[in-house]
Image (cartoon, rainbow, N blue to C red):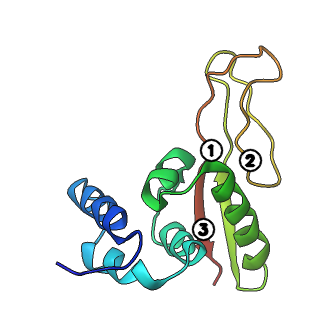
Amino acid sequence: EMEMEGGGRSLRRSVRKTYRRGEGNLRRLMSAVGTTRRKRLRDLLLSTDEGYPLDHLERLLEARRSTLIDDLEHLRLSFRHQDAKLLMVPPACTTCGFVFRLDAPKAPSRCPVCKSRALSEPIFKAEAEA
């Protein structure tokens, strides 16, 4: 088993859980240990066809929601210069069906129509332009 400094133990635990769930290649995730959180987020989003819900990204990257929202906004802006784009399936109210129209990554807490807090998670994915 690899020895890592600092928060390596929790990252290793996270990688094992991810690998057990069949969501990724263990070797690829372990090699990501030395990279930044934004780089790991970028690689995750570019590697999937289905995308990741925000709560799933929180668990995979062990980061707070507000931090990930900031990182997603940074990626959205930086993708303009990298021939890629950030795609988002917007959150929707599961009570009344209202679908949020968002230009930037956000995770609303309640529906503006019915005030319900039962919202679907936004799903994010990145796509490289040809």
Q: Look at discs 3 and 2 and give the one toward the viewer.
A: 2
Q: Which residue is mark 2?
A: 106
| Mark 2 Cα-neighbour bin, 10 Å: few <14, some 14–19, many ≥20 | many
Kind of residue at disc 2: Lys
- C-alpha gap between disc 1 and disc 2: 8 Å
Find out whether the residues at labels 1 and 2 contact each other: C-beta distance under 8 Å: yes
Q: Residue at x 67, y 38 (%)?
A: 91
> Residue 9 vs residue 84: left or right?
left
What number is the disc on residue 39? none
Kind of residue at disc 1: Pro
- Percent across and percent down for residue 129 are 65, 80
Find out whether the residues at labels 1 and 3 contact each other: C-beta distance under 8 Å: no
Q: Which numbered disc flags the more N-terminal residue, 1 or 2? A: 2
- Percent across and percent down for residue 59 are 45, 52
Assign a secondary structure to mark 1: loop
The answer to whether residue 53 is above or below residue 93 is below
Assign a secondary structure to mark 2: loop
> Residue 19 vs residue 103: left or right?
left
Q: Which residue is mark 1?
A: 122
Q: Which numbered disc flags the more N-terminal residue, 3 or 2? A: 2
- C-alpha gap between disc 3 and disc 2: 16 Å
> Residue 21 vs residue 56: left or right?
left
Assign a secondary structure to mark 3: strand
